[in-house]
Image: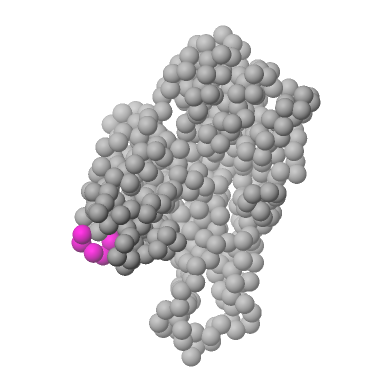
């Protein structure tokens, strides 16, 4: 057994929430630059240039790329040979996420009650946290702030097995087409296929935590990702929804076994501010 | 690139066409979901609005907090369609311009045609860049709403695209 004091986790979490919000990853920046070169018309090209300039400015000034610094989402993978001491992990994550949002001048965008009162909690708590017990003696924390302009364009469908690959493709493309200019394209499309209703949605969220453009390890899913990306980029939605070749930067699919009667598909859409950070302790 | 001064007059609105790129200079108000809900409730009750709407422009934004020494934090547009249920009533009371991102409902477009109003787009996710053209910020009302409070902003050469013009023509795809 390995012991780790939660204070070590706390310091890392406060840093990683600011970093994810203020710095676009190298893969995402490279992808934005490649996309700009593919836009031959002046308007989509200018929009891509503004996005790239914005992301450079944000990093230079350590300010958020987007004012919507999201609802905080963590994926926490804890090795079962690790013992956390000195406090509760849940409390450490929530407190230090709030600390990062306060000290990093990030927007607090969470309301305490979704339906009746909708009063802002004032510190961006609570974060949505997914815990997993894995092998080993380390803890891997992935943080992804999720903006709701794109989150609101996400959808789930419980398809029939008979709908097959064509049904899955049609649902994903329909969801992207209906999202259109609203989720701040160019978007990143996270797809979950299989599991149960809830598991499928979770898979689609985890798909948005992969490094941008990293393909699914299975060749058939990787081929489907490439095919869908090509179809989406022919839709002419384009940067900011004003036409062009760059409607999506990537399609990421995650799959899971499912029931003999089912074919769940979830599409979780992310904007071009593809933000996440990761720490292993 | 056209230079446009705020507040807008009707002649200026008529001269703007979907797809025009513009640089806005002048004052406008901020307002998003929660503020729209209160403004609509105010109008429904027949009460006086907390600020004069006639001829004004609303920017759908909830800025991030400013760092010490900054006028405003990153301040990009939020999705406009969420304001659609409240917007026709605001247009009926004189609202002339809106700034946001994404689609509008047919009811909003019809009200824009009726009242000669214009809808500008700014580029979502370019909040750090956009905040550079914001020069002054004054609180107006609903301060308890935090980032959703209404402020008055003075902008210089604020980049926008005419998304839907006063004849209802749109530049948006999809």
Picture quadrant of residue A186: top left
Nearer to me, A73 or A104: A73
Which residue sits at x=54%, y=33%? B80
Magenta segment: A214-220
Which residue sits at x=52%, y=34%? B81
Which colouring convention does the figure follow?
one colour
Question: In this picture, is A94 found above or below B131?
Answer: below
Residue B61 visible: yes
Q: Residue furthest top?
A: B11
Q: Is residue A219 magenta?
A: yes
Residue B37 % position (x, y): 67, 35
Residue A223 % position (x, y): 21, 55
Which residue sits at x=79%, y=26%? B47
Q: Residue furthest right?
A: B47
Residue A112 lies left or right of residue A2; in this view the side is: right
Nearer to me, B92 or A62: B92
Main structural element of the magenta stretch: helix, strand or loop?
loop
Which residue sits at x=58%, y=43%? B74
Question: In this picture, is A13 found above or below A1?
Answer: above
Residue A116 % position (x, y): 68, 49
Residue B5 visible: no
Residue B76 % position (x, y): 54, 39
């Amino acid at each position: 057994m390995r012991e780790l004091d939660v204070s070590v986790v706390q310091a890392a979490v406060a840093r990683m929430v600011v970093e994810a919000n203020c710095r676009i990853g190298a893969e995402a920046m490279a992808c934005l630059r490649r996309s700009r070169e593919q836009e031959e018309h002046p308007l989509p090209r200018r929009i891509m240039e503004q996005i790239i300039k914005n992301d450079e400015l944000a990093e230079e000034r350590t300010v958020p790329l987007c004012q919507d610094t999201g609802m905080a989402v963590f994926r926490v993978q804890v090795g079962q040979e690790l013992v956390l001491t000195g406090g509760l992990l849940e409390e450490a994550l929530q407190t230090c996420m709030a600390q990062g949002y306060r000290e990093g001048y990030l927007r607090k965008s969470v309301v305490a009650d979704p339906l009746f009162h909708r009063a802002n909690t004032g510190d961006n708590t609570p974060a949505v946290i997914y815990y997993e017990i894995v092998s080993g003696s380390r803890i891997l924390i992935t943080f992804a702030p999720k903006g709701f302009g794109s989150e609101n364009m996400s959808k789930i469908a419980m398809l029939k097995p008979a709908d097959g690959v064509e049904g899955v493709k049609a649902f994903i493309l329909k969801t992207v087409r209906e999202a259109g200019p609203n989720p701040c394209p160019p978007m990143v499309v996270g797809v979950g296929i299989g599991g149960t209703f809830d598991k499928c949605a979770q898979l689609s969220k985890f798909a948005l935590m992969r490094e941008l453009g990293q393909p699914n390890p299975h060749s058939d899913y990787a081929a489907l990702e490439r095919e869908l990306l090509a179809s989406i980029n022919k839709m002419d939605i384009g940067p900011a929804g004003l036409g062009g070749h760059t409607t999506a930067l990537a399609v990421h699919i995650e799959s899971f076994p499912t029931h003999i009667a089912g074919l769940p598909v979830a599409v979780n859409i992310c904007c071009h501010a593809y933000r996440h950070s990761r720490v292993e302790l | 690139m056209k230079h446009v001064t705020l507040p807008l007059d009707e002649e200026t609105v008529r001269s703007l066409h979907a797809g025009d790129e513009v640089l806005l200079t002048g004052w406008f108000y901020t307002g998003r979901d929660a503020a729209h809900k209160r403004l609509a409730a105010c109008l429904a009750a027949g009460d006086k609005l907390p600020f004069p709407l006639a001829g004004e422009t609303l920017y759908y934004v909830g800025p991030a907090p400013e760092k010490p020494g900054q006028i405003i934090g990153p301040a990009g547009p939020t999705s406009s369609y969420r304001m659609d249920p409240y917007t026709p009533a605001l247009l009926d009371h004189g609202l002339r311009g809106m700034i946001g991102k994404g689609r509008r409902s047919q009811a909003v477009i019809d009200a824009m045609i009726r009242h000669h109003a214009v809808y500008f787009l700014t580029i979502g996710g370019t909040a750090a860049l956009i905040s550079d053209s914001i020069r002054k910020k004054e609180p107006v009302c609903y301060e308890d709403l935090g980032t959703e409070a209404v402020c008055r902003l003075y902008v210089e050469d604020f980049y926008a695209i005419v998304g839907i013009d006063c004849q209802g023509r749109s530049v948006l795809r999809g």
